[in-house]
Image (spheres, rainbow, N blue to C red):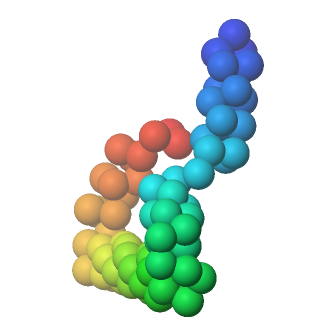
Amino acid sequence: MIQNYPLFVTLVIAAIFSPGPAVVLAMSNGFRYGTQKAIVGILGNVTALFVLGILSISGMGLLITTSPISFCFSMSCSPDN
């Protein structure tokens, strides 16, 4: 396991410092249409990420409250175990 650690750290650093598709889209829109139009796209992206986060949290909350067995199964299938 420890022999893969330098590779893991390198990939994590590369992922952190590389721009994602939302950043590339915001930069492209900023260059093409100006700052005001780019801000609309940025706000749309932030709103979409917020909605996806809320849906994810509520889905896991629903899973926990309705079926503890399913929740335990989902936890045992997680990559952290």
Q: Which residue: 34% across, 63% down?
A: 71
Q: Is residue 69 above or below residue 58?
A: above
Q: Is residue 72 above or below residue 15?
A: below
Q: Which residue: 62% across, 44% down?
A: 18
Residue 43 seen anywhere in this rendered image of the structure: no
Residue 45 seen anywhere in this rendered image of the structure: yes
> Which quadrant, please, contains the N terminus?
top right
Q: Nearer the viewer, residue 42 or 70?
A: 42
Q: Nearer the viewer, residue 43 or 74?
A: 43
- Residue 15 location in percent, x, y? 61, 41
Q: Is residue 46 above or below residue 78?
A: below
Is residue 10 left or right of 39 when viewed as pictured? Answer: right
Is residue 75 left or right of 46 when viewed as pictured? Answer: left
Q: Quadrant of residue 9?
A: top right
Farthest residue, direction top: 3
Q: Which residue: 41% across, 53% down?
A: 75
Is residue 45 left or right of 67 when viewed as pictured? Answer: right
Q: Nearer the viewer, residue 41 or 74?
A: 41
Q: Which residue: 52% across, 42% down?
A: 80
Q: Number of labelled discs? A: 0
- Residue 21 location in percent, x, y? 45, 56
- Residue 81 location in percent, x, y? 50, 40
